[in-house]
Image (cartoon, helix red, strand yellow):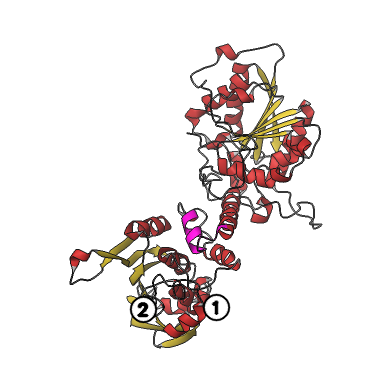
Amino acid sequence: MFLTISTTGSPERPATDLGYLLHKHPGKTQAFSTSHGTAHVFYPEASAQRCTAALLLEVDPVALVRRGRGKGRGGAPDAALAQYVNDRPYAASSLLAVALSGVFRTALKGQCATRPELPEQVRPLRVEIPVLPARGGAELVHRLFGPLGWDLVQADAVPLDEQFPEWGDSRYVRLVLEGELRLADALRQLYVLLPVLDDAKHYWISPDEVDKLLRAGDGWLAAHPEHALITSRYLARHKRLTQDAIERLELVRLAEADGSEVEEIDNAVDETRDTEERPVPLAVQRREAILVALRSAGAQRVLDLGCGQGQLLQALLGDPTYTEIVGMDVSVRALQIAARRLRLDRMGERQSARLKLLQGSLAYTDKRLAGYDAAVLSEVIEHLDPERLPALEYAVFGSARPRTVLVTTPNVEYNVRWETLPAGHVRHGDHRFEWSREEFRAWADEVARRHGYGVRYVPVGDDDPEVGPPTQMAVFTQHDGIDTTAATDTAAATDTAAVTDTAAVTDTSATTDTTEPAATDTGAATDTTETPKEGEAA
């Protein structure tokens, strides 16, 4: 079995730089021992204009049987003679993936000591694998490689026998990938997806396979639309390991969206434990500002609308002042993460009686939200298309009508202070808008006027004298004795029927609702916005 990796170049950027990246000299043929045979690396062509590196794996069938010991198709045959007659020496599989990892280990890590600038360069690549098992056919190949930046994904079915076309096609394809990528990214994708397409592994699956998957999938797997399928197949459908990997991928996705570390998202690190003086993350400052405003309002029954994975809910539960706490989000997946974070399955009866998790959308009115002291919409409104804001406005201020409403949103003027945020970009790709202080106040003033609320504004984070704070918060307080609900637009007044109480929010890996965008200030090193927000509701 073998694969080739080709690139093109110019006199300024010669294609033979591929040799530096792979740490294999184009003028040599090299051999490396593996646990199941010998891997050979050689270059069929090497010039400034075009360079091709080939990895050929010679499988030792005796070693494959002896080491398999009943694990994988090499030792657990699909048929009685499969131990002696199988496709392992010829078709790309986990054997080739392991050889790829061993022989090109440094390239996989994106390292090159001699030319450290090379690994970060995007270059034209062409990958060819003549025989690749594809359980799912060419359609699955396109689903797996299509979202990863390749310009060409070609999977030609290999016939069972060219002499007998009536027999049809085999489950093997000839794979060709073309596109401009970093070499390390291409190698990591192949390392993961070769055994996924084969849907088999030649070795025992242990818990450390989850770590291998997450390392190789760093930067692309969490956001892949087929991440659940990839994870399940890579881990040989091991239920517990698959569930663990999917949960960790979800945390990775949320952390990337929030611009924070996974440890902070997973609450594994005590924010007060580090005695070294360091900036307080903006997410923590935002949460503290919300708690101060709730205490000032004297609220006891609180709604967290767009609660995400439940950091604010966790803080509210820690204060016995709050007798009833409701978290609502459009995403079932986010609610499940919140349930695990809050340990609902271990929570005492008295504590669990204070908390309720609901699935619902702020694009619709919901009778379950009526009658509460306060509602919080933290980093929510910027995830809505502007034309949907009137629906949210009516659902919260016109229908639910809590006495106090807290709304936080990014201040776009502050974006120039984020060193890592490109000019003209919003803090997260899902933000439909980010308002200046003037725009936010104009919207909030009009909402307050229409619905009988007063409003004041609170800066959150360092209040820069030129551009203001990174987060702006509006505190709406209902005027006593004034009811303006009849004057509001009722076009959006439609009751939502979706109800998910705490009993329904269970920890199941079968749920793959990952539609929620994560509200975040990705430009800030210290901004660890913690909640994927309700804002993408259909």
38 sits to left or right of 477:
left
- The magenta stretch spans residue 432: no
Q: Position of residue 221 (x, y in %)?
A: 50, 58
> Which residue range is magenta in the image?
228-239
- Given residues 246 and 298, the one toward you in this image is 246
Mark linked to residue 113 = 1
Q: Identify residue type, mark 2.
A: Val
Residue 202: % across, % down: 48, 73
Which image quarter holds the N terminus?
bottom left
- In the picture of the structure, the residue carrying the numbered disc 2 is 85
> In the image, what residue occupies the spot 55% across and 40% down?
331
Q: Nearer the viewer, residue 315 or 446?
A: 315
**First along the sequence among labels 2 and 1:** 2
Which SS does the magenta portion mostly show?
A: helix
- In the displayed structure image, the side of residue 469 where residue 36 appears, left or right: left
Q: Secondary structure at mark 1?
A: loop
Is any atom of residue 343 visible in this view?
Answer: no
Q: Which mark is residue 230?
A: none
- Mark 2: give few (<14), some (14-19) or many (20+) Cα within 10 Å: few
* Among the 4 quarters of the image, the one containing residue 56: bottom left
Q: Quick check: can you spot residue 538? A: yes
Question: Tags 2 and 1 in contact by the CB under 8 Å rule?
Answer: no
State the residue in front, 453 or 446.
453
Give the crowd class for mark 1: few <14, some 14-19, many >=20 residues within 10 Å: few
Q: Is residue 456 left or right of residue 367?
A: right
Q: Amino acid at mark 1?
A: Ala
Task: Say which of marks 2 and 1 sits in front.
Answer: 2
Task: Give the answer, above or below, for where 249 lies relative to 535.
Answer: below
